[in-house]
Amino acid sequence: MFPGNKNFSRLFVPQPVVKQFILRLNIYKKADLQILEAVNANVRASDINLVKVKLRNRRFTETENKINFFCMFLKSNLPTHPVFFECLDFIVEFFNELK
């Protein structure tokens, strides 16, 4: 609890800092519609948002082959497996590093 029984605090954030923060959220970047449909259809409801964030934060460009790969990956039984996020992180980083 803050002094005076206040449950909040005001903080001034300079405009350039706000702009940089919003840019780093990658809100403007969305995954391909086929991938999003595969996520919604095959990933546990509790994990869908995290998967979408991981895909949104990718650095690689989606190509037809990468889209097909992700759709096959998501349609496998891996989204319910305990190592799913380790596999997803590996795939995203692998594609990020491809030249």
Image (cartoon, rainbow, N blue to C red):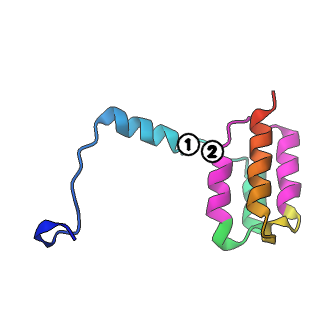
Residue 63 shown in magenta: yes
- Disc 2/disc 1 C-alpha distance (Å): 6 Å
Q: Which mark is residue 57?
A: 2
Determine which residue is flagged by label 1: 26
Magenta-highlighted residues: 48-74
Q: Amino acid at mark 2?
A: Asn
Q: Secondary structure at mark 2?
A: loop
Residue 82 shown in magenta: no
**Mark 2 or mark 1, earlier in chain:** 1
Mark 2 and 1 residues: CB-CB less than 8 Å, in contact? yes
Q: Position of residue 60 (x, y in %)?
A: 73, 36
Q: Nearer the viewer, residue 28 or 84?
A: 84
The quadrant in which the C terminus is found is top right
Q: Position of residue 26 (x, y in %)?
A: 55, 42
Is residue 1 among what the camera can see?
Answer: yes
Q: Residue at x 65, y 55 (%)?
A: 52
Quarter location, residue 36: bottom right
Count neighbours of disc 2 (C-alpha within 10 A) and say few if under 14, some if 14 to 19, many if 20 or more: some
The reply, left or right, for residue 84 in relation to residue 6 is: right
The reply, left or right, for residue 86 in relation to residue 14 is: right
